[in-house]
Amino acid sequence: MTLTLLVTGASAGFGAAIARRFVHDGHRVIAAARRLEKLDALARELGPTLLPLQLDVTDAPAAAALPDSLPEDWREVDVLVNNAGLALGLDPAWKAALADWETMVATNVLGVLRLTRALLPGMVARNRGHVVNLGSIAGDYPYPGGHVYGGSKAFLRQFSLNLKADLVGSFVRVTNIEPGLCGGTEFSTVRFGGDSARAAALYAGTQPLTAEDIAEAVAWVVALPPHVNINRVEMMPTCQAPGPLAVKRSG
């Protein structure tokens, strides 16, 4: 069966890798992002089964209008991949910029809510579909400087489970993908305000996950039989593991 997917944040990183994987697997992808020039380049690479769509997930009216704004033969979206998201800064909470916190909430939380609310009614009406959220192990394991980013991903984890509770008995599925250390994307460069050297230092001496690894996980959960729902997928490279609890000793 040929599926129609809508992938947010599809101009680079995980989103572009997911778009490539599903087009190569014979599906159709609506690639949504703010940077239209990158989407157009992706469309030239992948051909007519990729539809570029300029969309800012923080734009509430655009998200609400999305289902009716798509070309008629692209409106039945089978899979929504809520991939758009970002981390900003790594300062402790009392030094972090409030504007950065608000931007992360607007994108990582409100953007997911708006796209899900826009497309979920159609899935329920057709009694088929899949919402795939791109979470993070940061939603499970805290780290210094992770405050709002980790909080936003913890929200995604619980939101995904609660969506599944609402959808029980239907063939609309919900999965939260939770990657750990992942390199080769713009994520850390964006986090550090364009400081590529600082971003690269995070991955020095490691073999992190790649965007293609994440795309593989998404392809796997989507391809399972319709009665199978994978609630969450936690992924880490072999060079990473959960750490011990922090203990600050005096003296």
Image (cartoon, rainbow, N blue to C red):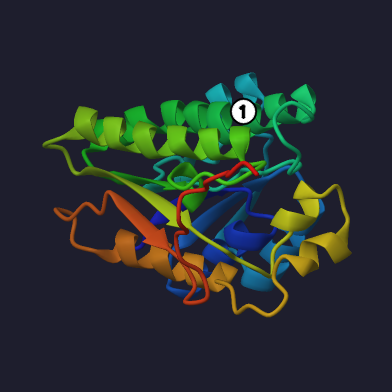
Query: Camera-side residue: 195 or 224?
Result: 195
Residue 31, image x, y percentages: 60, 52
Q: Residue at x 61, y 32 (%)?
A: 148
Residue 135's place in the image compared with 228, above or below, is above
Q: Nearer the viewer, residue 244 or 219?
A: 244
* Residue density around tag 1, few if under 14, some if 14–19, many if 20 or more, within 10 Å: many
Q: What element does badge 1 sit on? A: helix
Q: Which residue: 58% across, 72% down?
A: 210
Which residue occupies the foreground of this view, 18 or 125?
A: 18
Residue sticking out furthest to the top: 61
Q: Position of residue 62 (x, y in %)?
A: 63, 26
Q: Is residue 10 left or right of residue 77?
A: right
> To which residue does mark 1 refer?
105
User: Left of 232 or right of it: where is 217?
Assistant: right
Q: Quadrant of the C terminus?
A: top right
Extreme residue in the front direction: 251
Looking at the image, residue 173 sits to the left or right of residue 117; the answer is: left
- Label 1 amino acid? Val
The image shows residue 49, relative to residue 175, as above or below, that is below
Q: Is residue 213 above or below residue 173?
A: below
Measuring from the top left, give residue 11's x and y in whole percent.
70, 55
| Residue displayed at 21% across by 38% down | 127
**Does residue 83 appear anywhere in the picture?**
yes
Percent across and percent down for residue 110 are 56, 26
One can see residue 136 in this view:
no
Outermost residue on the left side: it is 169
Q: Residue at x 27, y 49 (%)?
A: 231
- 100 displayed left or right of 245: right
**Screen quadrant of the N terminus:** bottom left
